[in-house]
Each structure stands twice: as C-alpha cells, then as structure tokens.
Amino acid sequence: MRHCELLIIGAGAAGTAAAVAAWESGCRSIVLVDRGHSPGGVLLQCLHEGFGLSAFGEELTGPDYAGRLAEKLKYTGVQLLTGTEAVSVEKEKVALLSGRSGFRPLGFDRLILAAGCRERTIGALPVTGTRPAGIFTAGQAQECINLRRQSPGDNVLILGGGDLGMIMARRFTLEGKHVIAVIEQGRSCSGMARNYRRCIEAYRIPVICRSTVTEIHGEGRIQGVTLFHLDNGEQEYLPCDTLITALGLIPERELVKKLGEPDWLYLAGNCSRIHDIVDSAVAEAEKTGRDAALR
C-alpha cells in the first residue's frame, strides 16, 4: 500500500493553497486529490470578476484566481491526482481512492479535508406542491450557463438574496432572460453591498423582501409559485418557468463524520466554516497547511 505524509482531499482554492503552504513549510510527501479534471473547484464556473482583491491586489475572475493558485502548485513537488475521488477515510489513517485505474488504498500520517460545501436545496424549506422540472440551486444554474452553455429557463425567480443569488440574477439578465424578482426573507439582501450595487441596482432587478416560497405549481415543468409575505401573512401567486434557490451553504464533512476529532485531521476552507470571500478561505487554508506540515 502506498503511503504519504500529508493527504489533502479537494483541490479547490483551499486545498490547493494548503498544499502549496505545506510544501513551502518543508513537507515533501504530499498527495492532493480531486474528482475534477483540473484544480480550481467551484472557482472554474465563476466567470464574474470580484475575486482576489486581498490576495492579489486586483479583481480576477474565478478561473483566473484558480489559475494563479495552480501556477504556484506547479513549482512544488505535490502529487496532484485529478479525476480521483476519496470514497472513504478510516481511523487507521487509510483513504480509499477511486480513479481511472480503479480503487486503491492510500495510507497517510495527516489529512486535510478541503471538500468545500454543498448547497441547501428546496427540500430544506417547508414547501408544498409538486416537484416539477425547472428548479435548480444557484450553483447548478451557474454550472449550466457558464460551463455547459445551456440555459436553465427564461422567466426566472430567485429565492435567496445572498451573494450567489444576486450574482445569478445578474447572470440571467446578461443572458437575456427575464428575472422576475429576487425573493429574500430578511428586510434587505443579505449579501455584500458591492454585489447589491453591481448586480441588483445596476440592472434594476426587483427585490421582494420579507417573503418566501411556500408552494410550487406545475406538472412536468414549473409554472409558478405561491409567495408568502411574512409581515402581513398575505399570499401571492407568481408565474415562472424557472426557480433558482440560493438558500445558503453547508460545510461538506460527511467523509470524516464518523471519525470524531483525531489529532491528525484538519479542515480547510469552506469545509471548516463558510467564508464570505475566497481570499479568507485561502488565508485560513495556508495556515492549516503550515500547521499540518510542521506537526
């Protein structure tokens, strides 16, 4: 069975940054695995600018930011295994990897989990009605448009006024689609003021605050939703052919859930906690990489 000093699962921004920092701190046996075909993670589908002000002193697109990190990785001896998924991690410090050549175990001394996060879906809300086509998370819609060049729909309602919800409202508008409104439970959009100015104000996208979706209508394809106004209890029907949910993110830790908190396990990036900006996730991951290398 092969063995390494440090195994890092996830080659997004956090995992790549942790790998580079660990190498620069003197660790010379590092394996970085990712199910994707290249490092970068979700950054690769974020074509808008706004990344990197703290880390690089300029605004970059997601792919550009990922490219900067990948370039740093090239100057290390970190072994990058793309197209490889960690199926399980055992207390005996063995990970089962699944890749192009099949399954294989890999022993390690220390592990950094940088698996990112997952999106909350419509199932997280007490929503009644049907479950037709045309309902996507914001990340799924972003992937469809930016990577697959496919349109999820034409008349779009976005549930959730955080950063990703606002960014996708702008993206659909730029694609020539009709964004009916952004629906937000709070009294104002919950994302950064910068994104509100650039995405909502700049494109005059309607925002309906203190409201939520309570029922979905449509057979085959979504035809509309029932909107519940939290302040007065009134209900309103809004027609749409696409519902995008931006309901927040959950750290992805299922792979190590059964392990407890062994002293050889580290969490990095959004797997540790949800960060508002990627620069924050990278800075934390770099510290984690140094800590794991010097242990």
Image: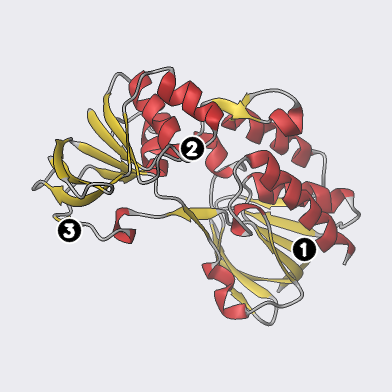
| Callouts 2 and 1 close, C-beta under 8 Å | no
Residue at position x 13%, y 54% from top? 130
Residue at position x 65%, y 32% from top? 65
Above/below status of 30 relative to 73 = below
Judged by depth in the image, the label closer to the viewer, 3 or 1, is 3
Q: What residue type is labelled 1?
A: Leu
Q: How crowded is mark 1: few (under 14 residues within 10 Å), some or many (20 or more)?
A: many
Q: Mark 1 points at which residue?
A: 6
Residue nearest the viewer, comparing 199 with 26:
199
Residue at position x 17%, y 46% from top? 234
Residue 143 x, y percent position in the rendering: 41, 38
Above/below status of 255 relative to 170 = below
Q: Which amino acid does label 2 sit on?
A: Asp
Q: What is the number of the mark on residue 54?
A: none
Residue 185 x, y percent position in the rendering: 36, 46
Say which quadrant the C terminus sits in.
Answer: bottom right
Work out how far the residue at label 3 is from the one at label 2, CA to CA, in angstroms.
26 Å
Residue 236 x, y percent position in the rendering: 15, 41
- Sequence-wise, the earlier of marks 2 and 1 is 1
